[in-house]
Amino acid sequence: MIQFNTPEWFFLLPLLLATGWKYRRLRLASPLRLLLQTCLLLALAQPALDRGGKDMDLWVLVDQSNSTAGIPAAGAEEIQAILERHKHAGDRVRLVDFAQSAVLRGRGDPVFAGGTAGTDMEQALAYTMALMSPNRTNRILMLTDGWPTTPLDQAAEQLIQSRIPVDYRLSVTFREADIRIEQIRTPARIRPGEAFILEATLAGPPGPAITVPWQISKNGGAPLRGTATLLNGKATVRLADRLSTPGCSAYEMTITPQNDPIPENNRAVSFLEVTGGNGVLLLSGYDRDPLAPFLEAQGFRVQQPPGLNRLDARHLSGVGLVIINNLSASSVPPDFLHALDYYVREQGGGLLMCGGRHSFGSGGYFSSPIDELLPVSMEMKKDKMKLMTAMSIVLDRSGSMSCSVPGGKTKMDLANAGTCQTISLLSDQDLISVHAVDSEPHPIVTLSSLGPNRKKMISSVSRIASMGGGIFIGAGLKAGWRELQRSVAGTRHLLLFADADDSEEPADYRETLKEMVKEGATVSVIALGTEKKRRCRTAQGNSGIGTGAHLLLRPPGGYPRHLCTGNRQRGPGRLHQGTHPPARHGWLASNCSRPAGMAPCRRRL
């Protein structure tokens, strides 16, 4: 069936008919001119052929965020029953619950990554469109309060291009009682030591005075607390501060009013830049890096952020050089690595990497955003490999792995992608096995060499799907260890990937780990969750007993990178270990005698 993307152009038809009747000398009714007018109108209307089948899938997106007060969820079952009664044969009604993430109802646990404090409508739409069958007609019905906490620019464009109609039904909540942060203002830029005023404006319902608790933190530190009184629905909080260290600082304000119907607008962030000379940002894998006092003695201003997991682009403000010293890629947020690429290429910043086994290729920087910035190859060359590696990967495919992540994918998709990338990077002589685990292990790839089987393995792993249920980590460890026992490789490593908040704890997993350690094998764990969860502590215990690494990921966007990085670091590549006398040369030698700050350089170091 033919559809028109811009049918409003057909409103020109009456105008053309009137013009042709009044101005006959234009001869608009002649065959050639009539044909040209028809072709022009059709081109402007953008005809498109609808390739969908006759059967329709109706996707009902149910907003489960806090601001809806449960109203859409309460009416979803009634709406589903009405739709089921009136649908045609072959039509399907499918429900997707969403808040800060999305999950298809009936396919996985109703667990929302990030909680229900926000409404990521764009991610929910992208996740739903990824599940749609191109051979069926699709339509979306949204049950929501109409207050998303993320922009809808990309989702709107995708819906228009895909020609998927969207209907909505708004739930009514009592918004007159909403108390919110209207804005938080700071100067955009100040000099070091200059005092400034932070001003936050609160708004709420007019009427009696209302006391609202607030707290403001700087760069994630200890918050300053107080209360504000709303008079006629308005209140202003003013604080004075002074910053001496050049760089970028973030001020985050949070209010906690009682019985607030819309908690999403109770948080605001403002950024402030402190200008200053060029400094050195030192990211180190050492508790006391010897480079710091050495650079400070030469007159350089050295910054060492305490929480590497909170690194972002603002840490590059006022910095002329970034040094990464023996720090693995898994310890650096991926957004910061992407910011480094722009910092070096466009802003002329300097980048220096040094260190041992946690740097360069062995540190997991191969194919990372900064791989091409450094004038050395990150690839683990075959002639540097000393031992053949046997690796067993155990993947969680429980119900929680069907939950959505940003980009319209699921946790399972990202776990598959990381495993496939690992298979691509290991050498031909290495051995690998893959198991998918829910309540029991399912062999996907039996232990075999990668050389002639690489493409077939990648094809099998990429089709792993979440099938519901929980995950029994003890059964998965046993299955992976049985595969490794068949190998005589010098390095045997098992990597367990699991949703830490959903893993079960059989009694025999410790015995399996002790047996593996006794026979020289190692175990690492990549888990999603928080350290407060008991099941996450179980995952940490696995890696501790297994003498391996434990990576706790939240949010799950770094699955492929961390999974691949962890496997590369346990792979057969080894750096030469030994002692070498220190030597001053090159860039460091030419700058050590300069007390002034470094000038940014557009060349890659």
Image: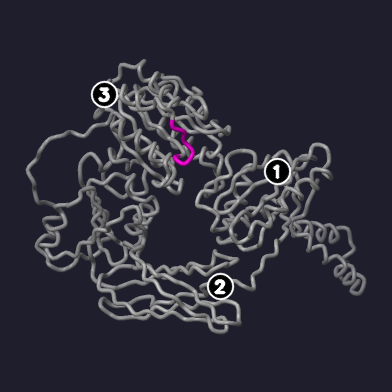
Q: Can you name the residue that lies furthest to the left here?
A: 581
* Magenta segment: 500-505
Q: Write down the residue under mark 2.
A: 179
User: Does residue 263 show up?
Assistant: yes
Q: Nearer the viewer, residue 93 or 351?
A: 93
Precedes in sequence: disc 3 or disc 2: 2
| Residue assigned mark 1 | 94
- Crowd band around label 1 with a 10 angstrom C-alpha radius: few (<14), some (14–19), many (20+): some
Looking at the rendered structure, the kind of residue marked 2 is Ile
The residue carrying mark 3 is 387
SS at mark 2? Answer: loop
> Disc 1 and disc 2: Cα gap in Å?
35 Å
In the rendered image, the vertical position of residue 22 relative to residue 470, given as above or below: below
Mark 3: amino acid: Leu
Image coordinates of residue 24 in percent, x first then y, are 91, 71
Q: Is disc 3 surrounded by few (<14), some (14 to 19) or many (20+) residues within 10 Å? A: some
